[in-house]
């Protein structure tokens, strides 16, 4: 079972594309909620005959509340045993590390998911601190340790910096990172011109990826590989990657339970709430969510790439771009068509 624990809605950065930007009331977590959430989902996983609980600490920026994270880890460790494992991950902007924090996370075998948008110029423009200063210099000292720890880098592509996409990825790889997830800022002001630049940058990225693979340098780039892998496996993204309504839960700092990460906002009126820490998960609401897997989105039913398209597969992307779990943003649809075509051209070249 996978749980995402949001320790806080607050953050020390002000990224240009942050989906928390419009949120007025921000909440911080507390020890009671963290322990209740871990205890609740530990029991839940056991009732489902599962023997592993993956806990991802998320925010806002979770390292603003490192002591809360420690409370969660210590409590979770007290529940683990030979028949039940607990594994940890953190999604962080990497600007608040200290030696003590890094040592602690490494000692507890944390998986690191770090947001890094590329070279100093890109990072500073897209991910400034709350006072407007750039954030790159705060991350830089930690890059060697993060790279050695097999960190997954998450990079957001914006229309403003799309022309540097290939260069930014090359920079990240040159720092020693080998796993990179990129995703466009789907809510950005994309135009025909910037979309075409994005396509050309993806083509450059694919050429770079092939060059690296031919030299035997292991590299994972989600934009290049995922659609080819799904095609070869003859399985849909929903089957292979999506746990929504089944095996993933996100808990807000205030104790509201949602079906996946992007839904988790501090809004007691959200139609996507599936429970609270006080009352637990509502089985009827969970069942409604699990139906998500049984059908395609209405607009996608006849589409030939629906099994490999994030627009049809990812409820979080639909919700964050349209406010509706079944909504499809025109940009997402066009982006997925373009990327699938490029991936298929690459696959043809590889296998011919
Ligand atoms: S680090 Fe994350 S939470 Fe913080 S401002 Fe950037 S996108 Fe938002
Ligand atoms: S809704 Fe999206 S982010 Fe959530 S589990 Fe499914 S694919 Fe992953
Ligand atoms: S490309 Fe568009 S229509 Fe096709 S599956 Fe994706 S979102 Fe649906």
Image: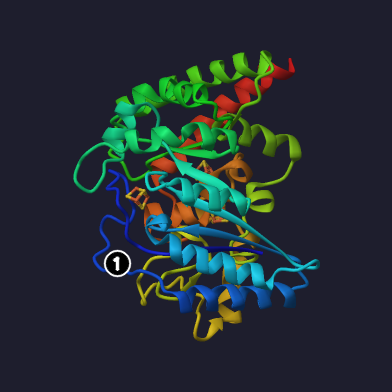
Q: Residue at x 29, y 66 (%)?
A: 26
Q: Is residue 37 visible?
A: yes
Residue 288, compared with residue 156, is above or below; it is: below
Q: Is residue 249 visible?
A: no
Q: Position of residue 131 (x, y in %)?
A: 19, 46
Between 175 and 269, the one lying in front of the other is 175
Residue 159, compared with residue 25, is above or below; it is: above
Residue at mark 1: 26
Q: Callout 1: 10 Å neighbours few (<14), some, many (20+)?
A: some
Q: Determine the residue located farthest toward the right in the rendered image.
A: 83
Q: How many marks?
A: 1
Q: Position of residue 338 (x, y in %)?
A: 49, 30
The C terminus appears in which quarter of the rendering?
Answer: top right
Q: Residue at x 66, y 72 (%)?
A: 78
> Quadrant of the rendered structure where residue 163 is?
top left
> Quadrant of the rendered structure where residue 324 is?
bottom left
Q: Residue at x 68, y 73 (%)?
A: 79
Residue 304, compared with residue 261, is above or below; it is: above
SS class, disc 1: loop
Q: Quadrant of ligand 2?
A: bottom right
Q: Determine the residue located farthest toward the bottom in the rendered image.
A: 279
Q: Position of residue 63 (x, y in %)?
A: 42, 55
The N terminus appears in which quarter of the rendering?
Answer: bottom right
Q: Determine the residue located farthest toward the front in the rendered image.
A: 100
Q: Residue at x 50, y 21 (%)?
A: 174
Between 176 and 322, the one lying in front of the other is 176
Between 116 and 270, the one lying in front of the other is 116
Q: Position of residue 240 (x, y in %)?
A: 68, 49
């Amino acid at each position: 079972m996978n749980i995402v624990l949001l320790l806080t809605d607050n953050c020390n950065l002000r990224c240009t594309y942050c989906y928390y930007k419009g949120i007025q009331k921000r909440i911080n977590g507390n020890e009671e909620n963290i322990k209740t959430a871990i205890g609740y989902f530990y029991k839940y996983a056991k009732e489902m005959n599962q023997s592993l609980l993956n806990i991802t600490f998320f925010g806002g920026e979770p390292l603003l509340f490192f002591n809360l994270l420690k409370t969660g880890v210590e409590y979770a460790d007290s529940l683990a045993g030979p028949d039940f494992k607990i594994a940890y991950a953190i999604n962080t902007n990497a600007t608040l590390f200290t030696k003590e924090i890094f040592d602690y996370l490494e000692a507890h075998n944390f998986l690191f998911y770090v947001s890094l948008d590329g070279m100093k110029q890109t990072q500073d423009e897209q991910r400034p601190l709350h006072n407007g200063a750039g954030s790159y210099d705060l991350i830089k000292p930690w890059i060697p340790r993060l790279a050695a720890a097999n960190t997954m880098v998450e990079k957001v592509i914006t229309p403003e910096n799309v022309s540097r996409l290939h260069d930014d990825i090359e920079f990240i790889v040159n720092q020693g990172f080998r796993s990179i997830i990129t995703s466009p800022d789907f809510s950005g002001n994309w135009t025909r011109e910037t979309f075409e630049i994005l396509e050309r940058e993806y083509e450059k990225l694919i050429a770079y990826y092939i060059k690296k693979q031919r030299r035997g340098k292991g590299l994972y780039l989600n934009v290049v590989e995922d659609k080819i892998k799904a095609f070869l496996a003859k399985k849909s993204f929903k089957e292979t990657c999506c746990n929504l309504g089944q095996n993933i839960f996100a808990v807000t700092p205030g104790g509201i339970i949602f079906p996946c990460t992007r839904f988790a906002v501090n809004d007691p009126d959200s139609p996507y709430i599936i429970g609270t820490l006080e009352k637990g998960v509502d089985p009827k609401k969970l069942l409604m969510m699990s139906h998500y897997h049984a059908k395609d989105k209405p607009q996608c039913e006849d589409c030939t790439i629906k099994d490999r398209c994030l627009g049809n597969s990812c409820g979080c992307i639909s919700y964050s771009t349209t406010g509706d779990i079944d909504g499809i943003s025109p940009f997402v649809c066009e982006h997925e068509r373009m990327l699938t075509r490029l991936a298929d051209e690459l696959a043809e070249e590889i296998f011919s």
